[in-house]
Image (cartoon, rainbow, N blue to C red):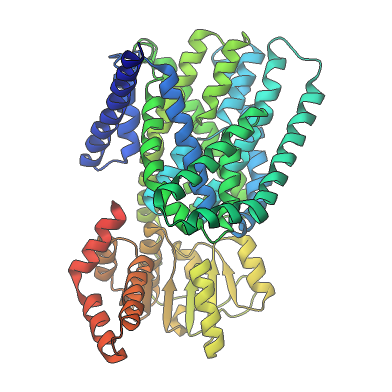
Amino acid sequence: MLAMQQSVLVTNLTILLAAALVGGMIAHRLKQPVILGYLAVGGVIGPYALGLVRDVELVEATATIGVALLMLTLGLEVSFSQLRQVGRVGLWGGIAQMVVTALLTTVAAVFVFRWSWPEATIFGLIVSLSSTMVCLKVLMDRGELDSLHGRIMVAILILQDIAVVLMIVVEPIFGQGISSLPMALLFTLLSVAAFVGLAIVSGIWILPWLMGRIGGVRSRELFLLTVLVICLGAALGTQTVGLSAVFGAFLIGLVLRETRFAHQALAEITPLRDIFAALFFVSLGMLLDLKFVTANWPMVVIAVSLVVTIKSLTVFGVLRSFGYSGRVAVLTAAGLFQIGEFGFILAQGGVKFGIISADSYALIVASAIVTMLLTPLSLSVTARLYGRLSPVPELPGKTVPLAPDGEPAAGEVVIAGFGRIGQSVAHSLADAGIPYSVIEIDPEVVFKVRCGGTACIYGDASNAHVLARLNLSRARVLIVTFPDPMAVFTTVKAARAINPGLKIIARVQRVKDGETLLKMGVQDLVSPEYEASLEFLRKTLIATGHTRSDTNKIVTAAAMDKKVAELAENNQEG
């Protein structure tokens, strides 16, 4: 009996992994995000199609592990300072987005689908949530996790994941009602506060001591097991007290990031995370009932259209109301319009409490899967179209020399993008006595920079009309630090039209992007990852006894070697 169960377990895992491999390879060959392949192949092997995998408990277990590991790595990569930078729009903007989306969707569901108010309300709550897994995976694949729209998306997603807890508590009242709702909410808030306090205490005293002991053994296996146990233990702990497993895993990741073991933990857990994340997306695809979609495709199209329209317009409107540019608002809306994975939990709860019918549940699942499938394509197409449609001034060199506050935005150097790289460059320029000005798209950063006395224009540097407000004819150098390749392209195009002789130094991540920028006339390209590899080489040569003269020759030769650059590109894409 035990041997038979083991055989079934191995068979199901093999099928899931093989399906993920096949779907990912097909998507890669078609030059599409691998997420699309995972979701699509999940629908093919699921119980509503070929039915190759029927062990629902195994699928749910692997999906839960995938969610926990992804949120742990998110916590390891996102710092408290990054969240504080978008704290206002992440908190109040996120709340506004959920409330407005839920209200509009509820009303639409009542009048379009003729659902009851309780059923429509649950649907509204489901639509107000976006997919943390899908968004993070797409942002990581595109290298935009540190971009402004990426950080805003992460902040809003985290708020949504926390709000799921309250939604789950409130959901039963729509079906059979609960008289102890205030006590349930109070218990939830106390549980959150207690877990946060426990995590902080553990991060200050317990985790550094524990990981220091494990690290002292110098065993990668034990270190990986320790990180895995901490992650799953935090997820299980929050789940036990009725909170979201996502919240626990993310919080413990934030705590671990403040320790000296953060980089090693991230390096060890990433391969395991990628495997379980693939299984998670395959498991989501398995929920799709292809027969229902085929028989009711007009209803599915209407539901998807409502979700995409309501959510995109709401996110766009919220960000614009907070002072963010059209590009950031459009990209954020293009990334957050899908229904999230926790919507499945609310939908299943709605069925359990008799609020949602079986047909409505199938429609919600189909809409969620379709919107997830559309997300990678939406971000990619939106970024390309926005770059191509960005207007260019008709007369090169004709600029408006005044900033919004009436002060001249003059300086030898103009820094486009005031993130960590831009701030580091600005600090060094100030030490060298070189005047500079800044153009930044984040209104909160602009306020801080102006308070510091630096000439700063608020706006999107990739927009030609905004860039034209700077007196680029008086500048000698433009530094473009954006992590988003399309923003770099459009900024360079606009700057070239205004001042063809301007020296431009641009950030680049991929070889093909670098080739495009060189054709556009960019003199110098900087790849943070590649430059870091050269610095590692330089320090290693010095540490092994090479003279500084020999070291400089070797590093210079490596920097000129195109094969090294191509290898770095392949490693990055892999």
User: Where, by quadrant of the figure, is residue 158 drawn?
Assistant: top right
In depth, the one of 531 and 259 nearer the eye is 259
Identify the residue at horizontal 36%, vertical 9% (top origin): 295
Where 424 sits versus 147, above or below?
Answer: below
Image side of residue 232 versus residue 512, left or right: right
Classify 34 as above or below 385. above
Q: Position of residue 266 (x, y in %)?
A: 45, 52
Task: Tell me the residue at 28%/66% (across/down).
Answer: 514
Estimate the x, y position of residue 434 in percent, counting from the top left. 52, 88
In the rendered image, the vertical position of residue 409 relative to residue 464, given as above or below: below
Residue pictured at 41% horizontal, 23% vertical: 59
Res. 476 visible in picture: yes
Extreme residue toward the front, this view: 217
Is 531 displayed left or right of 402 in the figure? left
The residue closer to the viewer here, 405 or 53, is 53
Q: Quadrant of residue 509?
A: bottom left
Q: Is residue 144 visible?
A: no
How far across and down, in percent of the image, does residue 366 sit? 43, 20
User: Where's the N terminus, which quadrant?
Assistant: top left
Position in image of residue 255 (x %, y %): 60, 52
- In this figure, what is the number of numbered marks? 0
